[in-house]
Amino acid sequence: MAGTDSRNDLEVSLPAGPTIILVEPQLGENIGTTARAMYNCGLLDLRIVNPRDGWPNPRAHAAASGADLVLDRARLFDSTVEAIADLQHIYATTARRRDMVKPVSSPRRSMPEIHREAARGERVGILIGPERTGLHNDDVVLAKAALEVPLNPAFSSLNLAQAVLLVAYEWRQTGLEETEIEMPQAGSRPATAEEVENLMRHLEDDLVHGGFLRPVERRPVMVRNLRNIFERSHLTEQEVRTLHGVIRTLSGRRNRKPSSETTEELEKPEESATSKD
Amino acid sequence: MAGTDSRNDLEVSLPAGPTIILVEPQLGENIGTTARAMYNCGLLDLRIVNPRDGWPNPRAHAAASGADLVLDRARLFDSTVEAIADLQHIYATTARRRDMVKPVSSPRRSMPEIHREAARGERVGILIGPERTGLHNDDVVLAKAALEVPLNPAFSSLNLAQAVLLVAYEWRQTGLEETEIEMPQAGSRPATAEEVENLMRHLEDDLVHGGFLRPVERRPVMVRNLRNIFERSHLTEQEVRTLHGVIRTLSGRRNRKPSSETTEELEKPEESATSKD
């Protein structure tokens, strides 16, 4: 909900995503959180086979956190065979190996194939079994491949909605062009080299003045080190101005007219003989 | 525990995975399901900052479905700053854009870098904010980058444990193969969050002292902007020491004894009655 227009999420740019089929889910909460996970990833078609506590289930709506669109469109079926009747490519999520001659893949590895199927306008369905037992072999057998998420072998049991999330997430990640790492500029623009250069000069001048860049023979290395720190920040123009202000403030030149060198000499605390760092 | 041997999951073959830091989580159930999602992906180090309902929380254990190992090892902290003090690379999960100059990446894109950091024996932490609001900007600013999961823009709010699951899942899925851009440390090591925090305090104190951070109501934004500049630099421990020296030199406090707190209070310009932050 969150003030969104429900037309938005249909996202016609992506081909219609896989249908999620929950087979005999036990808890209404898990149906709700499944709907939420689906909607997070732009999946809209949910089918439910023989839910233990009937359908509709108010607990599902309470747990969906606003993904009511998915629950309202969900369809109820008496058997897995009926639920998948109109679909063309069926995948079965499994947490443990079955004694079957059937390809076992992971959601990530299978997703390019699923995307190709969807792009051709073919209908894909993904079966998710009941909380306690997972899919029955009679359902797994309906699938062209088993999807197994590679997890900690010592603790691989996923919550129902978590399993749905990982499949739906892989659908969504594979479909979108990976965007490069973005660097928002917060209304500014990247500083020019000259602006950074002037900032570095300002800093160095004040440091020399304060006696920091000594001994003199080490000065080039120290200056280089300082420059590297700021180069790595990729400063914006606004930040360069802020840092000029920081330097002016710290060095007590804030209220100075630009060229009152002598005043500053007077203001500066004396370097006592004890200073040796 | 589903008959598993708890030694198994330590999985010495993988380098120690990221620490998950839940900042002010509201529901005990979500702490439990977070632990489950972590353990599913082999992550063991959970830290909790100011949980609303206290700690330990029996609801967390009930929801963990056997991931008690993670909950039993979880540590409680009073502030995010304390929780990350010993960590070296901090990432912040965010669902919405912040007005900050900070890299925004996705868990998938960042994971090779995180793996390289972990492989070098450096400590990585991932911040997760409270259910309702997500991370406060003051926490985001502590991070070197924001992690944003690309989801349905019309419905992108993830449950707490779902967000943890996606990050932990990406950790687990991403191999170590690709070694990319290296950042030589020039004989130093990445600074810890605590070292950077102390540096920022030093800078802020001296800026307040110099009258820079005025008007007072703009101070938080200005401080945040400054922190982002230095977070983006990924400072080494040696550079942190250099910058302390820079600040001391510029502010002419070079000869002060380290702990003249009271003097400083006296010296500090009075905050006028208008200050209300």
Image (cartoon, coloured by chain):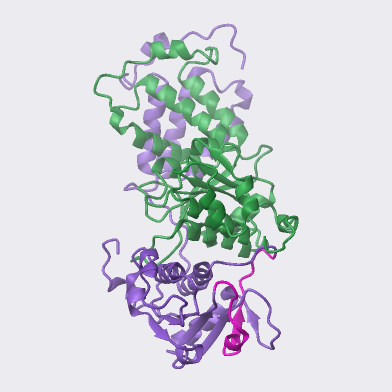
Chain colours: A purple, B green
Q: Is residue B177 left or right of residue B147?
A: right
Residue furthest to the front = A53
- Compared to residue B6, the image places residue B24 above or below, namely above
- Compared to residue B49, the image places residue B260 above or below, namely above
Which of the two residues, A177 or A216, is positioned nearer the viewer here?
Answer: A177
The part of the image, by quadrant, that contains residue B235 is top right
Q: What secondary structure characterizes most of the magenta part?
A: loop
- Residue drawn where x is 32% and y is 76% of the image: A72
Q: Is residue A152 magenta?
A: yes
- Compared to residue B8, the image places residue A246 above or below, namely above
Which of the two residues, A211 or A238, is positioned nearer the viewer here?
Answer: A238
- Residue drawn where x is 50% and y is 20% of the image: B249
At which x and y percent is residue A96?
A: 66, 75
At which x and y percent is residue B116?
A: 65, 53
Q: Is residue A253 visible?
A: no
Which corner quadrant holds the C terminus of chain B?
top left
Which corner quadrant holds the N terminus of chain B?
bottom right
- Compared to residue A273, the image places residue A215 above or below, namely below
Which of the two residues, A53 or A233, is positioned nearer the viewer here?
Answer: A53
The part of the image, by quadrant, that contains residue B229 is top left
What span is colored magenta in the figure?
A131-153
At which x and y percent is residue A153?
A: 69, 65
Q: Is residue B60 magenta?
A: no
At which x and y percent is residue A132?
A: 58, 72
